[in-house]
Image (tube, coloured by chain):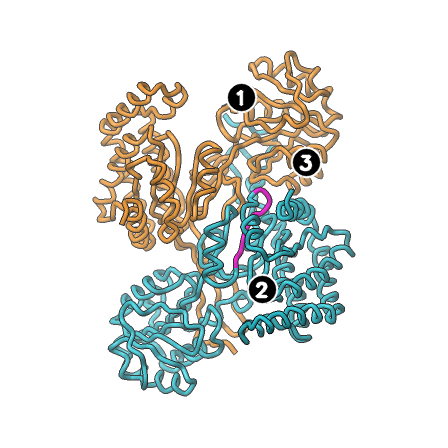
Chain colours: A cyan, B orange
Amino acid sequence: MSLITRLASKAATAARQLALLDSARKDQVLRTMAMELRNNRAAILAANAQDLAQAESQGLSAAMQDRLLLTPERIEAMAAGIETIVSLADPVGARRELTSRPNGIRIGKMRIPLGVVCMIYEARPNVTADAAALCFKSGNGVILRGGKEALNSSLAIAKVLHGALIEFGLPEALISVVPDPDRALMLELLQQRQYLDLVIPRGGEGLINFVTDNSKIPVIQHFKGVCHLYVDAEASLQQALQLLLNGKTQRTGVCNALEGLLVHAAIAADFLPLAAAALAEKGVKVHACKQSAHYFEDADILADDGFGQEYLALEIAVRQVADLDGALAHIQQFGSHHTEVICTQDVAAAERFQLSVDASVVMVNASSRFSDGSELGLGAEIGIATSKLHAYGPMGLESLTTEKYLVNGEGQVRA
Amino acid sequence: MSLITRLASKAATAARQLALLDSARKDQVLRTMAMELRNNRAAILAANAQDLAQAESQGLSAAMQDRLLLTPERIEAMAAGIETIVSLADPVGARRELTSRPNGIRIGKMRIPLGVVCMIYEARPNVTADAAALCFKSGNGVILRGGKEALNSSLAIAKVLHGALIEFGLPEALISVVPDPDRALMLELLQQRQYLDLVIPRGGEGLINFVTDNSKIPVIQHFKGVCHLYVDAEASLQQALQLLLNGKTQRTGVCNALEGLLVHAAIAADFLPLAAAALAEKGVKVHACKQSAHYFEDADILADDGFGQEYLALEIAVRQVADLDGALAHIQQFGSHHTEVICTQDVAAAERFQLSVDASVVMVNASSRFSDGSELGLGAEIGIATSKLHAYGPMGLESLTTEKYLVNGEGQVRA
């Protein structure tokens, strides 16, 4: 049996044990994990220093090195993150009654873990702790395949988490870090349909496409976020301006930042001068359609097929649209099924926007930056699905579970 | 653009229009479909006669020919099936409030169609009408790729359904039958991730594995059903006997029939003689473990690794187990995640069985034959998932939908 098959099969066996553990005991283990992360800060930082030294010698970008960096504060944030997960309700075991049939059998459902989740991600070592804790709380085994840049850090974090598992007599195989970043091993991992139930890739489009193209296991995709703010004819100018600035400039390198501004023709002459001044003040580069470009200094002119870029920077695409239908058509063509926002005081327009837009999160008069698990009240998230099957949008603990049917009778048979 | 890409892209465009159609209008279209099936009975039977003639000349088995056969009664059943779907609640558009956040934004969810569903199936032409109606009601486009044996019948049925679509000004592309059963075209279909949202293969294990191995689109699997009845020490003998006979003999060629009987050692001497007599009377061939074989005349002796067969016939595997844990271990090893039944009057044993067994339907004192959509109250089913993601167990209309987040605020931004 190969390393990968062994890892996967042991995870599946261990997960069956975890599926039956009660919530109180799972929370005890999680609290111990948080404590042990704090207690073993020095060891984790030492492993991280190895990764950082390698990154530097290999000339990784400053942004990449920053993602890789662990500090005492970031380790504290990891531990606190696990404590947040402790405070969340355990979805496993929740029952609901569906119906009683005329023959007297009673039909219900019970929530259960998926089994084993495989996370494939890049350089952020904190994902190791977050994903392990979310999978543990939801009763799932997890196999963590992070980027090679963060391997020493991830292994050090996993070792600490294993300490907590051992303390409670639980198998280490519940949380496994793939110890070799070889792509061939990742490919082998993606064939383990017998043992693994879900793959969640987090990273660039290339990684996600590679995983989707090669996986025999179900994959939940988190593609790019090309989020738009549509300022309707009946918008409050003040609100629209706030939503624009917050969405574009509060943080830029994230998938729920705004990448596009659509403005109803009837309000363009009022709103775009305000927008131009505010964006200029924040140093945002504007790419504009022909009709709106003259409101901005130094705007690039975008051709009709030039929209839909994910800038992840202080840049935005601006387009004037004839009406709500124009906005809907633009979003249909260029949106990424992530998050779309309308700013309007017109209830009918808001309603039609929310009904019509095919995105995982559709907002009225709120910042696209709220589109994440903790802001939406899920407590924590394992990802944001832009594919529709199983989950669509920010995924919390419940997304890591499924339901089985329970049927109870008194000997009924089928006629 | 190839035939398949054109089919898929047109289905995706048409599905966006259907997603916004209200329930009353969808029901009108479905009623018209049912009526048109009745009105066009002669044309459908003529097309079916072509398929049957070909089947005969190619020497297809009698069972296969029976599956293929349409009769006036079977066409009436198709029409009545569509009317049942009319009577079901439309899941699309259902909203639920989740929470309000401290900043005042309100979070809810709204149910929406998946988009386009691709059904891959074998010889039963009635699947064409059933699947088309379920997808239509749930707001999804559908691409139907049936077996070549039933192609003329499927095309004739689709033509009738198209008549109803046209009458209501809806695009025919909402319901497409792949007109060429070439496997290369099926492979091409499975690559259309841009346009298709879900593939449901229905048929033998070979077909399901082929689809899963080759699809870039999410697949919901419906593998075999190796369902067990476990007769606990505290079972009512009378109930156990009823459940055994109904599960094994009421219909044999179906996935929710019993294929295994597990009996607690403490009740074996009481129950197995009754079971032996009843099974013999029904002509059921028994494969038994060494400890239980002597209760039966002419039982084959099964080795410990010989269990887990899906007989789909008047045959059953019988094993004596030491206790509930023995039954759980057997099901863990040989079950198929479909349906498992315990017969017991011991509430604690029933509870532990339902908690521990990893199957999509776990029953207490009820026949495994209830494990289908209409018996469980879903009204109709598009399949029974034995994979866990998105759906697990009988899949009704709701399984063909997902939810998007709705966020409503008054200009809130993220701090």
Element marked by disc 2: loop
| Residue A319 against residue A158 in the figure, above or below | below
Give residue B249's mark.
Answer: 1
Element marked by disc 3: helix
Q: Magenta stretch?
A: A194-201
- Residue named by callout 3: B328
Q: Amino acid at mark 2?
A: Ala
Element marked by disc 1: helix
Q: Amino acid at mark 1?
A: Thr
Residue A148 picture quarter = bottom right
Does label 3 or label 1 sit earlier along the sequence?
1
- Does the magenta-highlighted stretch encompass residue A200? yes
Q: Residue at image x 67%, y 32%?
A: B330
Q: Are marks 3 and 2 in contact (CB under 8 Å)?
A: no
Q: Chain of mark 3?
A: B
How far is mark 3 from mark 1, CA to CA? 24 Å
Residue B333 picture quarter = top right
- Residue named by callout 2: A380
Q: Is residue B28 visible?
A: no
Mark 3, other Cα within 10 Å: few <14 / some 14–19 / many ≥20:
many
Quarter the N terminus of chain A occupies: top right
